[in-house]
Image (cartoon, rainbow, N blue to C red):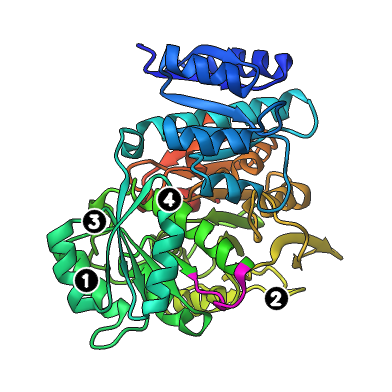
Amino acid sequence: MKREIKVLIVDDSALTRRILRDGLDRDPLIEVVGTACDAFSAREKIVELRPDVITLDLDMPKINGMDFLKRLMQHYPIPTVMVSANSSPGISQKAISYGAAAFVEKPQVNGHEGVVMMLAELSAKIRSAFSCDLIKNKRIRLLIVDDSAIARKILREGLQRDPLIDVIGTAASALIARDKILDLRPDVITLDMIMPEMNGLEFLKVLTPLCPTPAIMVSTQNNSAVTIEALSSGAVDFVVKPDSSDKGALAAMLAELSTKIRAAATVSTSRTKRTKVSPLSPVVQNISKKSRCEVIAIGASTGGTKALRTVLKSMPVNSPGIVVAQHMPPVFTNRFALSLDSDCVMKVKEAEQGDEIKEGIVFIAPGDRHLSIVRSNGVLKVHLDEKPKVNGHRPSVDVLFDSVVKCVGNKCVAALLTGMGKDGAEGMLRMHEGGIKTIAQDQESCVIYGMPKVAVELGAVDYELHLDEISGQIIRLL
C-alpha cells in the first residue's frame, strides 16, 4: 500500500521523537518524513519537506508549541496535532482555538499499554486530519442564524478566529437563512433555537429534506426538550448558550462550538437527511432463554441521540438492565431519557444515585456526572459522582466501561456508538481483554466515526456493525 500521509514530528525529547517515529511508521498510510527538536528546526523542515500533517509538542525551549502553532497557522496552515503531557484544564480547547486539528495527551506513565493506546489515537487523528477536506486549503464556510444581533456578533467574532472557519454570512431569521443557504451554499450552519416567524426546529425540519446542511443547534437549558427533538430531526450536535456576562463560559462555549463545527464539516449530507421512522417493532418481544448477561453497557457522543434511539427501541422488554453514557449537558439528559421512554418498550430513565439495575430498565447517565456500577449485597446499583472529567467528558464512557469490568467480569455485552474523540475505546479494550463481547458502530452508519474507529484500531472490537444490526447482535449475545 502506498504511504499517502507525510508527517513531520516536532518534539524536544529525542526519546519521544523515536517512540513516535517508530510507532507511526507502522501505519501503512503514514510516512514520517522528518523530525525536529524545536520550532526553528521545524520551520526549516516544513519549507524543505512540505509535510501533510505535523505533530507538535507543547513544552519546548525557545518557542513553545502554542506560540509556534499560532505562527504556523498564519504562515503555513498545515494540519497540526498537538501531542503533550500537559493536561491543564482548557489546554486542549486553547490549542484547538489556535488552529490545531486535534490534541493527544501523552501517557502519564511510560507503560507499554499507555504508549500503544496513545499511538493508536495519534495515528487515527493524523489520518482524520489528512482525509478531511479542511486541510486542502479549504476553510469551512459557515452561516450563523440567530435573531439576536449581539449573539451574531459574538459568534462571528469568536468563530472567525479559528483559521479553518470562514463565516460567510449571518441571518436574523429562518426566512433570510433559507435564501442565504441557497445563495451561499455553506458547509455548516449554526442555528438558534428561538427565532421569530419560524423557530430553529421548524426550520430544520423544512431545511433537511430540501437542502441538507450539517447544523449545530445553539440552545439554552430552557429549550432542552426542543433540542432533543432537533437532534432527532437531523441536527448534528448542539451547544448551550452561557450567560453573555460570563467571559470564561463564553470562551469555553466558542471553543466547543468551533470543535463541533469542524466535526460537522466532515459529515456527509446524506446522513443529515431525515428518514422515516419505522413503527416500534422489537427484534423479539421477549428473550426466551435465561441470560447469563447481568448488564448491557453502551457509550455514545455526537450523533448518539439518534443512534441510541435506533438501538434501544428494538430491545425486548425483558432485556438485562442497560446503562448508557451519552455525552450531554445537565437537564438535557433527563429530557432525552423521557423522549426515549416514549419510544421504547423498556423503561428509560435518567439514572439516580443507588438505582438498582434491573431487567427491563435503561439508565441514562445524568449530564456532568460520571455513571459507574457497583455491587452492594449482591445487587448491581448505580453510582454517580463528580470526579474530574476523563477524556474531556463527564459522564465518561471509559468510567462506565471500567466499572463494568470490575463489577460483572465477562457477564456483559458492550457497544460503542458514533462520536468524536476516543472516549470509551480504552475501556472497551479492557472489556475485550476481560472476555466481554464488544460491538462498535461501523463507519458507514456513524455521524462521526471517531470513538468506534479508535476502538477498532486498538483491537478492542469483536463485531463492527451497521447501526441497524447492533440491537439484533446484542440480543444474540445475551
**Crowding at label 3, few (<14), some or many (≥20) Cα neighbours within 10 Å?**
many
Mark 2 vs mark 3, CA separation in Å: 42 Å
Return the residue at label 4.
470
- Is 231 above or below relative to 460? below
Q: Nearer the viewer, mark 3 or mark 4?
A: 3
Is any atom of residue 458 visible in this view?
A: no
Q: Quadrant of residue 118?
A: top right
| Helix, strand or loop for disc 4 | helix
Measure how far apart labels 3 and 4 are at the Cα level. Answer: 34 Å
Tags 3 and 4 touching, CB below 8 Å: no
* Residue named by callout 3: 186
Residue extent of the magenta highlight: 240-247
Residue type beneath disc 4: Ile
Reading the image, the residue beneath label 2 is 352
Task: Give x and y (percent) for residue 266.
Answer: 34, 45
Mark closest to the chain's N terminus, 3 or 1: 1
Is residue 449 visible to the viewer in this orientation of the structure? yes
Q: Quadrant of the N terminus?
A: top left
Q: Residue furthest bottom?
A: 197
**Mark 1 touches mark 2? (CB < 8 Å):** no
Q: CA distance from mark 1 to mark 4?
A: 37 Å
Residue at horizontal 68%, vertical 55%? 400
Q: Amino acid at mark 1?
A: Ala
| Residue kind at label 2, given as amino acid type | Glu
CA–CA distance between discs 1 and 2?
Answer: 41 Å
Question: In what element is the residue under mark 2?
Answer: loop
Describe residue 153's horizontal placement relative to residue 207 as left or right.
right
| Labels 1, 2: front one | 1
